[in-house]
Image (spheres, rainbow, N blue to C red):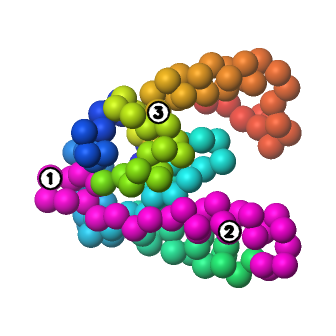
């Protein structure tokens, strides 16, 4: 399970060093094979390959005649890229994905259970502020009675 936030830097070639605390799990569960794709919130999603495969399968089974399903397939499957961690735990993020998420140097890697989100640091800070504003309103009904 991946949780927590890590402030990281992309190197000049667009490589991201996966934090050491996640490397062993990624090596044991997927041999460092990851899938990167876009998210409609403007970040990238980083999946261990075994977590991505059932999602990809479900997406590919959606009707290509439904315009919304087709659009989702184009976004998620169409932008999905397989990457492999190198011997020091880095992955190369393609220029296409870096451009989509506006990733430059300072990034945030956010654990989300079975995957990660990868954000531009400035966009992450703005998203956090927006999330705090959302929390001041009514909570969704599924959170009624939820406590920490």
Q: What percent of the width, then of the height, locates residue 37?
A: 52, 58
Q: How far, Cα to Cα, is label 1 from label 3? A: 23 Å
Question: Which residues are drawn in magenta?
Answer: 63-91
Between tags 1 and 3, which lies in front?
3
Q: Earlier in the sequence, mark 2 or mark 3?
A: 2
Sequence-wise, the earlier of marks 1 and 3 is 1
When asked about the image quadrant of residue 131, the answer is top right
Of badges 1 and 2, nearer the viewer stands 2
> Where does the image place residue 116, in percent across and percent down from the top left?
46, 48
Tell me what residue is drawn at x 47 percent, y 53 percent.
96
Q: Is residue 9 above or below residue 96?
A: above
Left or right of 49 on screen, residue 133: right
Local secondary structure at mark 2? helix
| Drawn side of residue 74 relative to residue 121, left or right | right
Crowding at label 3, few (<14), some or many (≥20) Cα neighbours within 10 Å?
A: many
Reading the image, the residue beneath label 1 is 88
Q: Secondary structure at mark 3?
A: strand
- Where residue 110 sits, quadrant-wise, is top left
Residue 39 in view of the camera: yes
Residue 48 position, x and y percent, is: 41, 63
Distance between mark 2 and mark 3 Cα atoms: 24 Å
Residue 121 vs residue 30: left or right?
right
The residue labelled by disc 2 is 73
> Mark 1 or 2 closer to N-term?
2
* Residue named by callout 3: 120
The Cα atoms of the two marked residues, 1 and 2, are separated by: 33 Å
- Compared to residue 119, the image places residue 93 above or below, namely below
């Amino acid at each position: 399970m991946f949780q927590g936030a890590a402030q990281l830097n992309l190197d000049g070639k667009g490589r991201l060093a996966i934090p050491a605390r996640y490397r062993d799990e990624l090596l044991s569960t997927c041999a460092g094979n990851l899938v990167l794709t876009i998210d409609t919130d403007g970040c990238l999603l980083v999946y261990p390959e075994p977590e991505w495969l059932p999602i990809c399968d479900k997406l590919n089974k959606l009707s290509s005649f439904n315009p919304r399903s087709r659009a989702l397939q184009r976004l998620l499957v169409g932008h999905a890229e397989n990457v492999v961690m190198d011997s020091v735990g880095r992955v190369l993020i393609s220029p296409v994905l870096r451009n989509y998420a506006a990733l430059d140097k300072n990034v945030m890697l956010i654990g989300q259970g079975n995957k990660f989100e990868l954000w531009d640091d400035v966009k992450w800070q703005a998203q956090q502020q927006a999330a705090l504003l959302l929390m001041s309103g009514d909570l969704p009904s599924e959170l009624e009675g939820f406590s920490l």
